Image (cartoon, grey):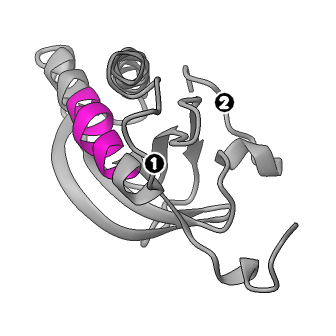
């Protein structure tokens, strides 16, 4: 049964956010179950928001460059970060018995899954982009967010894909 105050309830989460010059890309590991979802969003929105989620804070992780209009490097980053996040979730978070409070669980999600996944994916990109005259930079962040519901962003009909965007 929903309380009359459920509208004001905020459920924390965090995402890996990649900001391109005109668009954003995110990878979200749903803290309630470990589902990995993500999407590429145009136009870029700052502060970041998607469906029922809004940015609370962000932490810079790094950046990578790629040839303008060639998103293959960005896809390599997304695939590597998503795969690594899944591995780290399964190794560190999947049992769910260690942490009961969602805020603490999200803190562990950032520390044990999202941040190392983003850092590892950035390392994987080193030397992959061939320098051209029109290079652009993408910045990578860990963004802490609040949601109005304890679910993934795809659950509300948002066109979110499971990896490989």
* Position in image of residue 96 (x %, y %): 47, 32
**Of residues 14 and 164, the one drawn nearer to the viewer in this rendering:** 14
- Residue visible at 39% across and 43% down in the picture: 99
Where 131 falls versus 33 (above or below)? Answer: above
- Residue visible at 12% across and 19% down in the picture: 126
Where 71 falls versus 155 (above or below)? Answer: above
User: Was residue 8 drawn as part of the magenta stretch in this picture?
Assistant: no
Q: Mark 2 highlights which residue?
A: 161
**Left or right: 37 as drawn, with respect to 156:** left
**Left or right: 79 as drawn, with respect to 64:** right
Rendered-image quadrant of the C terminus:
top right
* Position in image of residue 108 (x %, y %): 30, 43
* Position in image of residue 9 (x %, y %): 63, 76
Residue at disc 2, secondary structure = loop
User: What's the magenta bit mostly, secondary-structure-wise?
Assistant: helix
* Position in image of residue 160 (x %, y %): 68, 38
**Left or right: 165 as drawn, with respect to 78:** right
Is residue 20 something one can see in this rendering? no
**Of residues 138 and 120, the one drawn nearer to the viewer in this rendering:** 120
Where 41 falls versus 83 (above or below)? Answer: below
| Segment colored magenta | 106-118
Which numbered circle lies on residue 100?
Answer: 1
- Residue visible at 66% across and 83% down in the picture: 8
User: How would you rate the neighbour count of disc 1 (Cα within 10 Å): few for under 14, some for 14-19, many for 20 or more?
Assistant: few
- Tag 2 near tag 1, CB within 8 Å: no
């Amino acid at each position: 049964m929903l309380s009359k105050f459920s509208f004001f309830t905020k459920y924390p989460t965090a995402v890996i956010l990649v900001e391109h010059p005109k668009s954003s890309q995110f990878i979200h590991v749903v803290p309630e179950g470990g589902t990995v979802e993500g999407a590429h969003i145009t136009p870029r929105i700052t502060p970041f928001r998607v469906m029922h989620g809004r940015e609370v804070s962000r932490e810079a992780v790094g950046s990578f460059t790629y040839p303008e209009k060639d998103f293959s490097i960005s896809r390599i980053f997304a695939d590597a970060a998503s795969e690594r996040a899944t591995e780290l979730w399964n190794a560190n978070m999947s049992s769910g018995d260690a942490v009961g409070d969602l805020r603490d669980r999200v803190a562990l999600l950032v520390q044990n899954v999202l941040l190392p996944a983003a850092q590892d994916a950035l390392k994987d990109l080193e030397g992959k982009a061939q320098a051209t005259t029109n290079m652009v930079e993408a910045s990578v962040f860990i963004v802490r967010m609040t949601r109005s519901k304890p679910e993934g962003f795809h659950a509300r009909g948002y066109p979110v894909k499971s990896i490989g965007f």
